[in-house]
Image (spheres, helix red, strand yellow):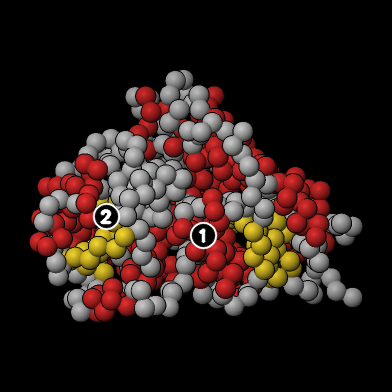
Amino acid sequence: METPESRKLHAVLLSSPGMGHIIPIIELGKRLVAHHSFYVTVFVAGAASQLPASESKIIEAAMMNPKLFDLIQLPPVDISGLVDPDATVVARLCVMMREARPAFKAALSALAVCPDVLILDLFSTEHFIIGDELRIPKFVYVASNAWFLALKLYSPTLDKLVEGEYVDQPMPLEIPGCRVVRPEDVVDPMLDRSNQQYREYLRMATELPMGDGILLNIWEDLQPQTLAALRDERLLGRIARVPIYPVGPLIRPLEPVGPNTRELFDWLDRQPSESVIFVSFGSGGTLSADQLTELAWGLELSRQRFIWVLRAPTIKSGDGSFFDSGNGSTDMLSFLPDGFVGRTQGIGLLIPHWAPQVNILAHRAVGGFLSHCGWSSTLESIVNGVPMIAWPLYAEQRMNATLLAEEIGVAICPKVLPSKKTVGREEIRCLVRRIMVDEEGNAARKKVKELQKSSQEALCKGGSSYECLWKLREDCKARLLEEPTKK
């Protein structure tokens, strides 16, 4: 007779929409199947039609890949009557996941095999109750870094301690055992305490420790001090109250080079090693028209080779997100300075909308990455040993940029946050040259090469992330043995 000790465990993973959520969940599922004797079912909430084309392609590609696991799209939910038309991304995602709970529960009931463990993404903590009903372990996968998690967990305490808006505080926000958070670096939900997304953010922070553990998309050597604080019962451990499992870096694999990208990689093959800077702002990041113009001039003045994933400027002032990816114009070149394309011919490539980022970063010719600092993009850069120019746009990216530049040491930043003012062409020229050719960039390049090696070691058998996932498996088995009457 099979017991939890002798059979493969069935893990059900749930992701909210958005590339920064779906990709880490899918890659976690792959590792659980390939290396840790799990059977996996992945559910994705939100219809493909609700996502940008680049993101829906990721889901479609995953479904077409050799079936390591079942991937099921939950029926779309209509939240139009539940959120304001101008509701933030966080508010929309939270409401979407809340409304998807009945469909998720019904889908679980329809499975041939009852799950042994639930692994939910950050926006799905309200689904913990389903794990309680099934009497199975339940975990949350925070596909970001330990400093972000520390701030998140400590936010209910800050909510009681801090008066007024966080961004107006005269002093940095202190988190026990961690680096302080500058007011201008707080995550988007903390920018306005009267907004719905702030209330949702606090709710998630309160629910996080109610699971049986928290997975992080980092590895032990990346943030050892912050991980120590999260585990120390005298510090943040008294708030987290659950095990922390650093299981990363989990990133997209290299993709086959198709005919549509053959010209791009033929061009890269002709360039010297580490001579090209890659410019991309994620699956939905956009710039204002003024900032796009200054970036074009900065790249041209730097006299460095570049690949630029170009999008139309955002309609609104400020920066876009994956729910607002520009004005939809297909005439990309009309937004560039007159003569830019001709003057940069031969040293730069412009790619509209989307590019195979992991393959580009893995190419020997790429030596720098001007990035929005989304955590998946950050890991893809580190894993490939590419230093960064940090250009944060939204979400937790300002924190990521500060972490990368001031603690980890693999990035440089503009003098002022791009969200505060337009970064001029001369500063952009200097940033590109600093990371690509100046002596100052050598320190970031050396550090990122060290982390590239440690990230690879972490995922190998016996490495810290491999062992963390193995411990997760053993912890699940122990819990199941305590619940022999599981439904």
Q: Is residue 328 above or below residue 11?
A: above
The residue labelled by disc 2 is 332
Q: Left or right: 68 with respect to 330?
A: right
Q: Disc 2 residue type?
A: Met
Question: Which residue is situated farthest in the top direction here?
Answer: 163
Label 1 CA crowd tier, 10 Å (few <14, some 14–19, many 20+): some
Q: Left or right: 286 with respect to 242?
A: left
Q: Position of residue 155 (x, y in %)?
A: 52, 34
Earlier-in-chain disc, 1 versus 2: 1
Q: Disc 1 residue type?
A: Ser
Q: Secondary structure at mark 2?
A: helix
In the image, which disc is placed on residue 56?
A: 1
Q: Residue at x 63, y 69 (%)?
A: 32
In the depicted view, which residue is nearer to us: 12 or 410?
Answer: 12
Viewport quadrant of the C terminus: bottom right
Question: In 3D space, how far apart are the residues under numbered discs 1 and 2 (Cα atoms)?
Answer: 22 Å
Q: Position of residue 295 (x, y in %)?
A: 20, 50
Viewport quadrant of the N terminus: bottom right
Q: Position of residue 140 (x, y in %)?
A: 62, 51
Q: Residue at x 12, y 52 (%)?
A: 338
Label 2 CA crowd tier, 10 Å (few <14, some 14–19, many 20+): some
In the depicted view, which residue is nearer to us: 438 or 299?
Answer: 299
In the depicted view, which residue is nearer to us: 5 or 306?
Answer: 306
Q: Residue at x 60, y 51 (%)?
A: 46
Q: Left or right: 254 with respect to 36?
A: left
Choose top left, top right, bottom left or bottom right for residue 314.
top left
Q: Left or right: 11 with respect to 345?
A: right
